[in-house]
Image (spheres, rainbow, N blue to C red):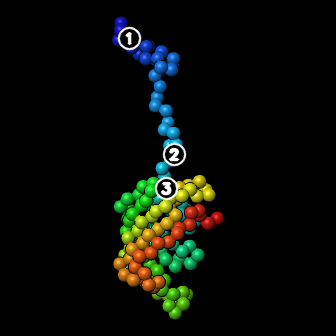
Amino acid sequence: MLKRLIPVIALSLVLAGCIQADPPVAGAQNQDIYVVNCVSFEEKPVELVLYCADAGQILNQITWSSWSSTQATGKGVSISNDCEPSCAEGSDVISAVEIRLLKPVTSESGKRVFSQIEMQYDKVQPSGVMDEVLDLPTDVFN
């Protein structure tokens, strides 16, 4: 008889408010984080256009070793235009690159996005650097 009463007692306690599910954690939010890739928000893109106006530098073949709400790290290939003698006639400079995405912010669209990229190249770039930090767009082009 007691076995049959346990479910009834449990249901009565739930209905009376004595047993409750854990409340949602205050401030809990969607942990999705993106990077703006010109016209879209992307998670873990395999290709990232850094200069949307002319595609003057593209990171591709990206593999991400970590992707969290605070930073992302990965490796890929950088293809940059050396703009010699002009950007229209320039040649591609191809380099291996280590990538870190940092400084998450909330975009005007309400999505969490990384706002900065750090890159370490395997050889000197047309700009004369081997390490570079750039601000990223925080919203897509409309």
- The residue where tag 1 is placed is 4
Q: Residue furthest top?
A: 1
Residue at figure coordinates x 48%, y 38% from the top left: 25
Question: Which numbered disc, 1 or 2, marks the residue that appears first in the sequence?
Answer: 1
Q: Answer with mark 3 or mark 1, whichever residue precedes in sequence.
A: 1
Q: Secondary structure at mark 3?
A: loop
Residue 93 — which label?
none
The quadrant the C terminus occupies is bottom right
Residue 7 in picture, x, y percent from top left: 41, 16
Residue 20, placed above or below residue 90: above
Q: Residue furthest right?
A: 142
Q: Position of residue 91 (x, y in %)?
A: 47, 87
Q: CA distance from mark 1 to mark 2?
A: 41 Å
Residue density around tag 2, few if under 14, some if 14–19, many if 20 or more, within 10 Å: few
**Mark 3 vs mark 2, CA separation in Å:** 11 Å
The x, y position of residue 137, in whole percent, is: 56, 66
**In this rendering, which labeled residue sits more in front, label 1 or label 2?**
2
Q: Residue at x 35, y 61 (%)?
A: 65
What amino acid is found at the position of numbered circle 2 in the picture?
Gln
Residue at horizontal 38%, vertical 11%? 4
Secondary structure under badge 2?
loop
Q: In the rendered image, which quarter is residue 108 located in?
A: bottom right
| Marks 3 and 2 in Cβ contact (< 8 Å) | no
Image quarter hosting the N terminus: top left
Identify the amino acid type marked 3: Ile
Residue name at image x 40 percent, y 10 percent: 5
From this viewpoint, is residue 37 visible? no
Image position of 27 (left or right of 4)? right
x then y, percent, for residue 56: 52, 79
Question: Where does label 2 land, which residue?
Answer: 29
Identify residue type, mark 1. Arg
Residue 33, numbered label: 3
